[in-house]
Image (cartoon, grey):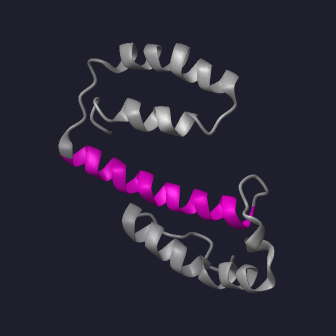
Amino acid sequence: MLPGWIAPTILEQLVKLLEPHQHDFIIGSYMPEMVEALKDVKIPFYDSIVMARLFIGLIIKIVYAFLYQEEHITPDFLFEPGWISFGGHMIWAVNMIADTLSGQTQTDLGV
């Protein structure tokens, strides 16, 4: 989806968030194998735009879920009642933005 010159740079920054052994595996073992396996794969420009939109929509929803539903990266201030209320009231907007970007629709509107 991303050009070959930028994808490794972004991945290297993202894996810095992981444990050292996970980082070493991804950079030392996984990435070289993926580069070799995908070296002849060509994705048309239009398809890469569609994939990017789907990916951005996914990331928006995942980040929101981790902030408000998981206990992995939740900043302390989000436990305050005002922020919890804000998060609950804004889920429709987050879903609308992510769904519009990705072209996917929310299947459980009552949730």
**Vertical position of residue 59 compared to residue 24: above or below:** below
Which residue is depicted at the point 53% across and 73% down?
94
**In-image side of 47 versus 92 (left or right):** left
From the image, which quarter does the N terminus lie in? top left
Q: How many marks?
A: 0
Name the spot of residue 56 as percent of width and height, x first. 43, 56
Q: Quadrant of residue 111?
A: bottom right
Name the spot of residue 48 as percent of width and height, x first. 28, 44
Determine if the magenta segment contains residue 39. Answer: no
Which residue is depicted at the point 65% across and 35% down?
18
**In-image side of 2 versus 102 (left or right):** left
- Seen from the viewer's position, the closer of residues 68 and 79 is 79
Start-end of magenta stretch: 46-69
**In-image side of 42 versus 24 (left or right):** left
Q: Main secondary structure of the magenta part?
A: helix
**Vertical position of residue 56 compared to residue 85: above or below:** above
Which residue is depicted at the point 51% across and 55% down?
59
Q: Which residue is the extreme one toward the left?
A: 45
Name the spot of residue 46 as percent of width and height, x first. 20, 48
Name the spot of residue 35 as percent of width and height, x first. 38, 18
- Seen from the viewer's position, the closer of residues 46 and 76 is 76
**Vertical position of residue 55 compared to residue 61: above or below:** above
- Seen from the viewer's position, the closer of residues 75 and 100 is 75
Q: Quadrant of residue 40?
A: top left
